[in-house]
Amino acid sequence: MTKWVLVPAAGIYVLLVGLLCAFGVVVGVSGGAAAPACGPNGSTLTVPKPWKDLNRPREEDLDYLTPEELTNATVVVSTIRTVTEGSNGGPPEVPLAPGAGRRAAEIALVVTWVESNLRNLNYGDADSLGLFQQRQEYYPVTVSTDPVRATRAFLVGLPGVKGLVHVPEWPGMEIGAAAVRVQRPAQRYEFRYHEFDEWAAAATQLLWAGVPVCPPDSVAPQPALHSAALPLARDLLPRDEYDDPHHDYPAVDLAVPTGTPAYAMVPGTVSLVDDDRCGTGIVIAAGDGGSYVYCHLSAVDVGEGASVVAGQYVGATGNTGRSTGPHLHIGIKVGETSRCPQTWLLSVYDGLAAPNPLLLPTVGCSY
């Protein structure tokens, strides 16, 4: 298996593939003609778990982020890049000086590791939730538990709540000092933000350019039960992510890195979508009377009129169209009526038969 390793060179960290190189050159080592192993997040990338600055492990002792941790780390970094550099050729929402966007990503990664170990927590602390453990006094639950919106709030704030960009001189601060100004922890906990600078710089360098995506022919089909499958690999997201409400109408947004494999939820016939709102997408018209909508894709692997089976790879997630960060938008429609997909997705996640879309509710899954 190809390993992506970080080693010091000329005072900074550079990316190597399975080989230590004193000159900071990117070198690929894949054991002859063998391709890198394709992970459950649809990428060949592995990112080390954080180490404390004064105790960096040897390469052979490194542990690596789990699929859930890597997904969340990638969403944090890619959301900050979208906000500070723009997407789809558009201007940035928050223009920053060169290098400041990456610095913001380093700070955000340290905060999310210290606060939640890169897990989108909706339990435990009665007052603090999500990747950043943002307090409900300042951040609505719908923001703190949504990785994309939580990251944006950390960076640019909310009405009445300052974000990182409002901290004077933050790009030149030590990571811990800048993090404390946004998170406002109890003084006895401030030291925790000062221990992972080295890892944050290395991880951001890996993730800033985007996660390398497995080629389509190496993406295995998603297991299908009862002629239905999840739109993402089952072990990629925890169950409760499929139960999140949508921001304005019946649907669900699943925060995943650009390039994550997407799968057909049902057997049916494909029609292609390309508009300003959905971006690049597809609709699968199924025999159960439902239309299964996928939006914001970065790539489509099926053509207009193609027949697909449940669990078939259909494309890669992205950030196209009207999108504030990388994610997969899933909708289920019957005729022109949008239905709540959460019950359908949870049933399939649990290995049960998928509900008939005609029986899905039309209210109660948005805010």
Image (spheres, grey):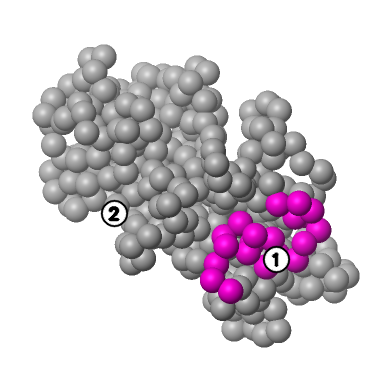
Q: Where does residue 218 sit, x and y in percent of width and height?
A: 48, 50
| Residue at the image point whose x is 43% and y is 29% from the top | 295
Q: Quadrant of residue 184?
A: bottom right
CA separation in Å, label 2 and label 1: 35 Å
**Quarter-wise, where is residue 252 in the image?**
top left
The reply to whether discs 2 and 1 touch (Cβ–Cβ < 8 Å) is: no
Q: Secondary structure at mark 2?
A: helix
Q: Residue type at mark 1: give it.
A: Ala
Q: Which residue position is annotated with label 2?
A: 239
Q: Nearer the viewer, residue 119 or 367?
A: 367
Q: Nearer the viewer, mark 2 or mark 1?
A: 1
- The quarter of the picture where the C terminus appears is top left
Q: Closer to the N terminus: mark 2 or mark 1?
A: 1
Percent position (x, y) of residue 131? 47, 58
**How many residues crowd mark 1 within 10 Å: few (<14), some (14–19), many (20+)?**
some
For residue 131, say whether it is visible.
no
Relative image position of residue 137 (x, y in whole percent): 43, 52
| Residue bearing the label numbered 1 | 177
Q: For the point 69% across and 47% down, which residue is it?
A: 165
Q: Is residue 275 visible?
A: yes
Is 182 colored magenta in this rendering?
A: yes
The segment highlighted magenta reads: 167-187
